[in-house]
Image (tube, rainbow, N blue to C red):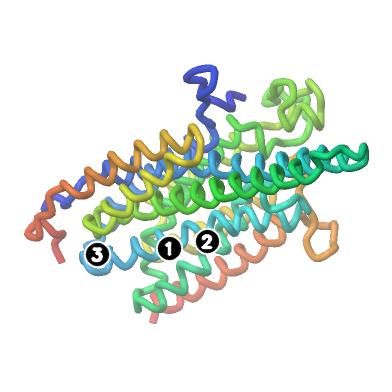
Amino acid sequence: MFDYLVLSESLKLPMYNLWIAAGLIAGFLFLEKQLFKYSISEKEQKKIYIAIASSIPFGFFGARAFDSWVTGVGLLYGGFTFFGGFLSASFCFLLLLRIFKLKIINTLNILVPSLALAHAFGRIGCFFGGCCHGSATHSFLGVIFPQNSPADLLYGQNPVHPTQLYEAFFLFILFILLIWKVPFRFRTSFYLIGYGIFRFLIEELRGDPRGILLTQTLFSPSQLISLALFLIGVVLFFKNKTSASC
Amino acid sequence: MAEQKGTNVPMILGIIGGALGLPGAICNGLCAGAASSVMTEASKQIAEQGGQYSALADNLSTGLQTTLMVYFAIGLITSIGGLVFGILAKKMSLVAGIVMIICGIGSFFSGLLGIIAGILFIIGGIFALVQKNDPSSTPAQ
């Protein structure tokens, strides 16, 4: 864990935020290449950028509010949850795509590799920040986080699964598959199915407080959302397959 | 293929500025909450001891909390504004440049990280304003 880049006694830059910034930059640079590759007109590009930029504040607020809701910690004191941000930003983004009369699936197919790339960088940020850690393990993959880190407070100086790095590795692989192997029209469904399954499974290794949704304790909130994403992905896949064969 | 117009510098600076400005703003919000509870407790103790400075401590507590909450609001709005318009800088350079500079100036009032974010926003805003927009270099349809 290396949570701050110390420039001086009074100036410390949070590594978590710097990695998120690196992810956003990489994501936007790649998106730009994709928009150019698929010959999206300047007018449509502008609309897509406005939709993304407008969704970002909603994403931040959603990530915070969702975390606050499932963990019960106050809105000012909590952290950020990927799924909270993903759901609220998606809602705003899809609404704006509809208002701008853009092709929703086509736009999402252009966007999802960038999302996977930015998310992968964000997970490395989680590792540096010490959040989103796994449960205790004695395998060779185990990592001991420094004293007073969230993992140390829960498990002491015992190795835990570096679930942040597992997820970052998976997301980089997903990104590569999306751009090189998956046909363009199946990108969104592949992302939703792939990430849904992975996230559902990795939740079993997570060791940080997962929160409770709808008073049930069988599945974590993220597992329930992963299931929903998986189902949406399957529906989209068959819809695209049928429309392609028609 | 034609070259894409504009520069990515405002976008990069806007994102880094936003990512650094947000925790600074949130920190102010947390400080507001913490300072308020400490000051309220202090004023309660003064009142219990029958001290004559109870009202003064109350006023100080409210004043400090309000100031920090104003810093929090300014930091939050300018960080998100700088980030969002940094992303839009390539598509609407004039508006984005002006908003980034305004957000940059605003960020100076929200702590040390806010000052760094402010400098990045201002540089990004200037880049957005002076970038070359060549309408002939749009991608092929």
User: Of discs 3 and 1, which sits in the foreground?
Assistant: 1
Q: Give residue B44's position: percent from left, percent from top.
A: 86, 43
Same chain for the residues at labels 1 and 2, yes or no? Answer: yes
Looking at marks 2 and 3 on the same chain, the residue that comes earlier in the sequence is marked by 3
Q: Residues within 10 Å of mark 1 (few under 14, many from 20)?
A: some
The mark closer to the camera, 2 or 3, is 2
In the picture, the disc for residue A40 is 3
Residue B72 in view, yes or no: yes
Furthest residue in direction bottom, as rendered: A246
Res A202 visible: no
Q: Residue at x 78, y 53 (%)?
A: A72
Q: Name the residue under label 1.
A: A54
| Amino acid type, callout 2 | Phe
Type of residue at label 1? Ser
Q: How crowded is mark 3: few (under 14 residues within 10 Å), some or many (20 or more)?
A: some
- Determine which residue is flagged by label 2: A58
Q: Which chain carries label 2?
A: A
Q: What residue type is labelled 3?
A: Ile
Q: Mark 3 lies on which chain?
A: A
Crowd class of label 2 (few under 14; some 14 to 19; many from 20; radius 10 Å): many
Residue situated in front as seen by the camera: A9 or A128: A9
Q: Which SS class for mark 1?
A: helix
Measuring from the top left, give residue A7's x and y in whole percent: 47, 20
Residue B89 image position (x, y, % from top left):
27, 53
